[in-house]
Image (tube, grey):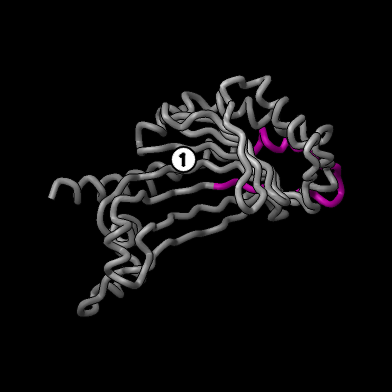
């Protein structure tokens, strides 16, 4: 399936990459501006640059169109992503550029890479209790859902996650998580958050091997293939379809 096909299954689809570093990233003015200026030269529509209160730096496109690019520098993490891309390659071009620039412009060598993440995320707009939707869609016949048979019982904190190994050495991993935005104890607060989205995220993480020099670009290409196969073969059928069916049923009642 294409990225555009995944966008049709949810309200927003995100392709994000993160490089987690062992050492703190540089914070010198010239280094930061030179790096972001190089990104903007490749993608001229990325014209919004800002610093958050925690000293994270962002360069991004305008959000108004509903699809946009962004690049970030945090204390020990480089981020690159795109919301609602028309194709995977459209998002990957930016990620590859960041990986190619980081050794020369940010001093991030293979020794400095703690892990490399590629994440596909999907948001599903959902009114009411997200926890109940997740429980019904994904845990209908499970031991967890049997707890809901108890008098007055209903799920109020339910954001399941699982990490699986994708390699014999456990250095390649996939994390699948579903996040409820209504996981609070107080009913009044839950009601205030009723229109936010349920988030489904699939992250393929690669830890560098200790006996070879880490090639970030080559690893990224493998992770893209793994993530796309995982989405096509497992996530859509077993996670996306049940969630969208339950959400649609609740909207029609």
Element carrying mark 1: helix
Q: Which residue is mark 1?
A: 233
Residue 1 visible at all: no
- Residue at left offset 67%, top offset 49%: 55
**Quadrant hosting residue 28:** top right
**Residue 8 in the image: above or below residue 202:** above
Residue 199 position within the rendered picture, expressed as x and y whole percent measured from the top left: 42, 49
Confirm whether the magenta stretch covers residue 204: yes
Confirm whether the magenta stretch covers residue 38: no
> How many circles with numbers are drawn on the protein?
1
Q: Quadrant of the N terminus?
A: top left
Q: Is residue 20 left or right of residue 47?
A: right
The residue closer to the viewer here, 98 or 207, is 98
**Quadrant hosting residue 248:** top left
Residue 246 position within the rendered picture, expressed as x and y whole percent measured from the top left: 25, 50
- Residue at left offset 55%, top offset 53%: 175
Per the rendered image, the range of residues in magenta is: 203-223
Residue 193 position within the rendered picture, expressed as x and y whole percent measured from the top left: 32, 57
């Amino acid at each position: 399936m294409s990225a555009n096909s995944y966008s049709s299954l949810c309200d927003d689809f995100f392709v994000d990459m993160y490089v987690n570093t062992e050492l703190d990233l540089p914070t010198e003015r010239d280094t930061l501006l030179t790096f972001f200026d190089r990104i903007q030269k490749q993608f001229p529509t990325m014209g919004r640059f800002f610093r958050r209160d925690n000293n994270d730096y962002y360069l991004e496109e305008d959000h108004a169109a509903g699809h946009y690019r962004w690049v970030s520098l945090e204390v020990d993490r480089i981020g690159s992503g795109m919301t609602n891309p028309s194709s995977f390659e459209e998002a990957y071009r930016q990620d590859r550029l960041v990986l190619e620039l980081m050794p020369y412009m940010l001093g991030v060598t293979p020794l400095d890479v703690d892990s490399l993440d590629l994440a596909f995320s999907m948001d599903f707009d959902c009114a009411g209790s997200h926890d109940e939707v997740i429980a019904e869609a994904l845990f209908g016949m499970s031991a967890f859902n049997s707890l809901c048979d108890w008098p007055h019982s209903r799920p109020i904190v339910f954001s399941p996650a699982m990490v699986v190994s994708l390699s014999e050495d456990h250095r390649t991993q996939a994390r699948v998580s579903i996040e409820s935005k209504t996981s609070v104890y107080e009913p009044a607060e839950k009601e205030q958050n009723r229109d936010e989205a349920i988030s489904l995220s699939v992250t393929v993480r690669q830890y560098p091997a200790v006996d070879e020099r880490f090639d970030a670009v080559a690893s990224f290409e493998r992770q893209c293939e793994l993530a796309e196969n995982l989405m096509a073969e497992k996530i859509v059928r077993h996670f996306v379809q049940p969630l969208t069916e339950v959400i649609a049923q609740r909207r029609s009642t």
